[in-house]
Amino acid sequence: MDNQQILDVIKKELVVALGCTEPVAIALAAATAKQQVSGPVTNIHVIASGNIIKNAKAVGIPGMKARGIDFAAALGALVGNPKKQLEVLEGVTEEDEQQALKHVQNGKVSVSIADNPKKLYIEVIIKTDRESSRVVIADNHNDIVLIEKDGKSIFQGGCENIYFHSNKQALKELTIDRIYEFVTTIDIKELDIVKRSIQLNKTIGLEGLEQEYGLQVGKTIKENVKKGFLADDLATRAMSLAAAGSDARMAGSPLPVMANTGSGNQGIAVTLPVVAVGEKLGVDEKLLIRAVALSHLVTIHIKSKFGRLSALCGVTVAGMGASAAITYLLGGELHQIKAAIQNTIGNVSGMVCDGAKAGCAMKVSTCSNVAVQSALLAVSNHEISSTDGFIHDDVEKTIDSFCRLGNEGTKQTDELLLQLMLEK
């Protein structure tokens, strides 16, 4: 696998996103469907997989007070710009919000669970007095696989069985060894997109530290450092900045982020713990960019086997990437980077996903703390033994076991979590 193939993977899996990816994907489907018909919208019907409903039900939408699947669909249909892809809601106004809310309050929007095995599935049907349209997004948040008008197919995408934007073979060839070689040898000029991920995600992290978003997890940590209740150490810095970014994103900040493998929250959790540690250590920009590239690629590598959505929290995977990168910043060698990943997997592998919401910032904080702890253990040559749990001597086998747990072992958990959420 040559460097250009790895660069292609990075460029395809790092995408700028505005707003939590699930409601934005619903808005994108709705905006695309509305584009196919003329006249005022009389009915919008959203059919989505359980995982989409779980992650879109309560999370904030950029610049909006209202939230919900029905609201996201109405907003996308009425004012969304499908050409902007995952920035489809850029520029929406308070007036747009009120217009979308009226559609919801007048009963023009309905939502149901899809009878479909895919974990990422969104179908939006829009009707006017004269026409109807149907749009399906599957597997990736911005992969439109079907557009119909008046029951006739006008577009059928070729991505129905592709779970990632990247070439499947390229993803299979990624290993921790190859990622490390790439990160330590690639010309830094080739990593501009990684540099941009640092800039975008740090901006929203700082926003979360200054403003009152969501649970204010990051801001509260920072305030308690000032009070002397918490130390201003590596772990606290990582927890505060990363959680603040998640606070802002989950509460509907209008700032864009660089998503990793379809998740903006994951993009934050991949970059900001590393940035915070790097700044605390006073490393130069080039080393920091290489470290964040390592974090992104380790996360992409694991997520390519883990899948886009699961009953397990995706931020745990980001923590694995961050732990590898923090170990690198601390001067760790390849075997210690592998040890850090092993330690993180052994710690947070059981964290479940109960939807995108303000509380996600607490999980980001937890995984950031674990990333630092795992790295510190690794550089001291301490690693969870293969006699423990499902940890293997080979980090790649441990990753495979973790991903099997997420894919094969949590179906019933996923169904129960959704049921519990919908019963409220």
Image (tube, grey):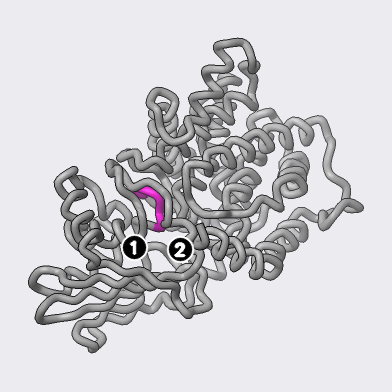
- Residue 167, position as x, y percentages in the image: 49, 68
Relative placement, left or right, of 314 versus 216 is right
Instruction: Count neighbours of disc 2 (C-alpha within 10 A) and say few if under 14, some if 14 to 19, many if 20 or more.
Output: many
Which span is picked out in magenta?
A: 16-22
Locate residue 269, reporting x and y percent.
54, 41
Residue at x 80%, y 55% (from the top left corner): 394
- Which secondary structure, mark 2? helix
Task: Specify few, some or many for label 1: CA neighbours under 10 Å numbering under 14, 14-19, or 20 or more.
Answer: many
Read off the residue under disc 1: 26
The residue tagged with tag 1: helix, strand or loop? helix
**Residue 194 position (above or below residue 203):** below
The residue that disc 2 covers is: 52
Question: Is residue 304 in view from this perspective?
Answer: no
**Label located before the other in sequence (1 or 2):** 1
Q: Residue 149 sits in which quadrant? A: bottom left
Q: Residue at x 58, y 30 (%)?
A: 239
Q: CA distance from mark 1 to mark 2?
A: 9 Å
Residue at 53% of width from left, 44% of height from top?
360
Q: Are marks 1 and 2 in contact (CB under 8 Å)?
A: yes
The one of 341 and 104 positioned closer to us in this rendering: 104
Residue 380 visible somewhere in the drawing: yes
Could you tell me which quadrant the N terminus lies in?
bottom right
Q: Amino acid at mark 1?
A: Ile
